Amino acid sequence: SSDWEKRTKEIIAIQTEWKTIGFAPQKMNVKIFERFRTACDDFFGRKAEFFNQLKETFKTNADKKRALIEQANALKDSTDWKATADKLIALQKEWKTIGTVPKKIGDQLWDEFLAACNHFFEARNAVNAGQRNEEHANLDKKNEIIEKLKNLTAETCDNVQKEVQKLVEEYNAVGHVPYKEKDKVYEAYHAALDRVYKDLNVSVARKRLSNFKNKLKNVAEQGGSALDNERNRLVRQFETLKSEVQTYENNLGFLNVSSKKGNSLIDEMNRKVQKLKDNMELIREQIKAIDQQNKE
């Protein structure tokens, strides 16, 4: 358009100069003027056509931008953060592909479009900030529960199993933690939980073995094959537990460990396997006690 303005000034200057020139011979004067006027009219006609087309292009571009503004306004209050963010980013990319409009209206349209986009992204950022604060608070809660599990022993608690269940329920009720901390806190929790269960099983096993040894003398006093019968019963029980362990371990091989649910199930099964193995160890000790009693 600047080129058109430059050429227009040149044409007007030529027209002004034309007026300063005297008449040509009468026979030639009209024809020369007609040629000059035709050339000028042709220029101004093409100029008018160009600016009419430009005006139409501006209108088309402005309409396209208004359509994008309308879409952005329809999305700005959405709380579907991920999907809406993707849509608005796509609209922003589309905006850049649209041609120009006059600066005054262009600035106005851009301000409207930007306001709609900013409205959404500022709301999303505020929610994300709140969510991050909540996740850090959840992390503190989970770490506090983990510390309680670490300090939990038969000496510090009358009913360890009941307290463990209470802490497990509290832990499961806590919401999400920061993504970067997720694996770390998960591993710390299950390490503490496994330690408590192991200590609990050992403590129970010791009590059971002690009680068994105390009762063993009474069994021995019955005479006959009482001790052998008890030993055979324990051997059968040991083989049953051994079979259960093998079944669990076979099933563990088929589980999908990629999902959180899969991991939780595996952890639970591993604890069951460990408990079965602890019971097997207890039975071994009970059988040893019988063998020792038979020697006496």
Image (cartoon, helix red, strand yellow):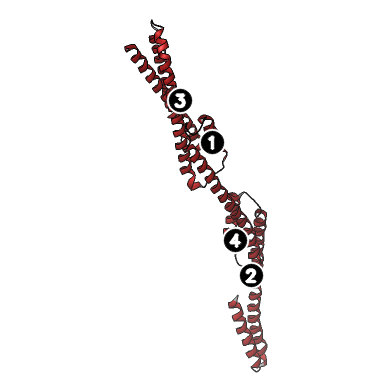
Determine the CA span between mark 4 and mark 1. Answer: 54 Å
Residue in view at x 49 percent, y 44 percent: 182
Determine the CA span between mark 3 and mark 1. Answer: 20 Å
Q: How packed is label 1: few (under 14 Cα within 10 Å), some, or many (20 or more)?
A: some
| Mark 3, secondary structure of its residue | helix
Front residue (pair 294, 17): 294
Instruction: Look at discs 3 and 4 and give the one toward the viewer.
Output: 3
Quadrant placement of the N terminus: bottom right
Quadrant in the rendering for residue 175: top right
Determine the CA span between mark 4 and mark 2. Answer: 19 Å
Instruction: Look at discs 3 and 2 and give the one toward the viewer.
Output: 3
Residue in view at x 46 percent, y 40 percent: 188
Residue occupying the far bottom of the picture: 22
Quadrant placement of the C terminus: top left
| Mark 4, secondary structure of its residue | helix
Whether 54 is drawn above or below 249: the answer is below
Circle 2 is placed at which residue position?
54
Q: For the residues labelled 4 and 1, say whether their Cβ atoms are less than 8 Å apart.
A: no
Q: Which mark is residue 167?
A: 1
Circle 3 is placed at which residue position?
204
Mark 2 and mark 1 lie on one chain; the one further toward the N terminus is: 2
Mark 3 and mark 4 lie on one chain; the one further toward the N terminus is: 4
Amino acid at circle 1? Leu
Amino acid at circle 2? Leu
